[in-house]
Amino acid sequence: MENTSEVLPPMPGQRLARGVARGLRDMGFVSVEELVPAPGLRVDLMALGPKGQVWVIECKSCRADFQSDRKWQNYLPWCDRFFWAVDAAFPQTLLPPDSGLILADAYGAEIMRMGPETPLAPARRKAVLQGFARHAALRLQALRDPAGVISAWA
C-alpha cells in the first residue's frame, strides 16, 4: 500500500530520480543524485552496482527538458553504461536508440532497454569510485552535521 503521508520531491526530474534509485536498489545498486564527475558536468543519478558497475542515468521529464540537454554525451566517458529515465508519457522515440532506457515514476523503475557496455579504464574507474564515495560520505555528513560541512563539492 502506498504511503499517502509521504512527501514527494517537488520537481518532476527529482521524482523520476527517486523512483530510479528505488528500482536500482532492488537490483543491488546504490546511487547518488546530482553528482559532479568533472568540472562542468552534473549527472542526475550515478549508480554503483554490486560488481562495481558504474551507471549514469539522466532523468528527463518532458520533450523540452530532453531537447535542452546539450551535455549528455560528455557523461559517457564517466560510466560503464548510460541510461535515460523517463515516465510513461514521455515521447520515447526522441531518445537515441543506442542508449539505455528506464521507465520510472516516483515509486519505482524498470529497465526497458540496456545501454551498451563501455567499460571504464582502470584509472578512470578508480577516480569515479573515489569521487562517488567522497560525495556520498559528504552528503551523509551534511545530514548529520549541517554546520560542519561547508560544501559537498570540496
Image (cartoon, rainbow, N blue to C red):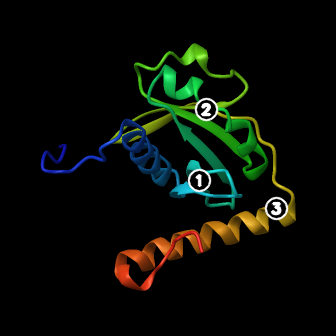
Counting residues from the start of the chain, the first of labels 2 and 1 encountered is 1
The residue indicated by pointer 1 is 46
Residue in front for this viewpoint, 130 or 150: 150
- Identity of the amino acid at label 1? Met
Q: Residue at x 77, y 41 (%)?
A: 117
The residue indicated by pointer 2 is 69
Q: Nearer the viewer, mark 2 or mark 1?
A: 2
Q: Residue at x 41, y 22 (%)?
A: 88
Residue 145, x across and y down, in percent: 36, 83
- For the N terminus, the quadrant is top left
Q: Residue at x 65, y 34 (%)?
A: 114
- Residue 130 sits in quarter: bottom right
Residue 124 circle label:
3
Q: Is residue 99 left or right of residue 146?
A: right
Residue 111, x across and y down, in percent: 54, 34
Q: Secondary structure at mark 3?
A: helix
Q: Secondary structure at mark 1?
A: strand
Q: Secondary structure at mark 2?
A: loop
Residue in front for this viewpoint, 153 or 95: 153
Label 2 Cα neighbours within 10 Å, binned few <14 / some 14-19 / many ≥20: few
Label 3 Cα neighbours within 10 Å, binned few <14 / some 14-19 / many ≥20: some
- Identity of the amino acid at label 2? Asp
Residue in front for this viewpoint, 153 or 23: 153
Q: Nearer the viewer, mark 3 or mark 2?
A: 2
- Identity of the amino acid at label 3? Arg
Q: Residue at x 46, y 71 (%)?
A: 139
Residue 122, x across and y down, in percent: 86, 63
- Residue 48 sits in quarter: bottom right
Mark 3 vs 2: CB contact within 8 A:
no
Counting residues from the start of the chain, the first of labels 3 and 1 encountered is 1
Counting residues from the start of the chain, the first of labels 3 and 2 encountered is 2
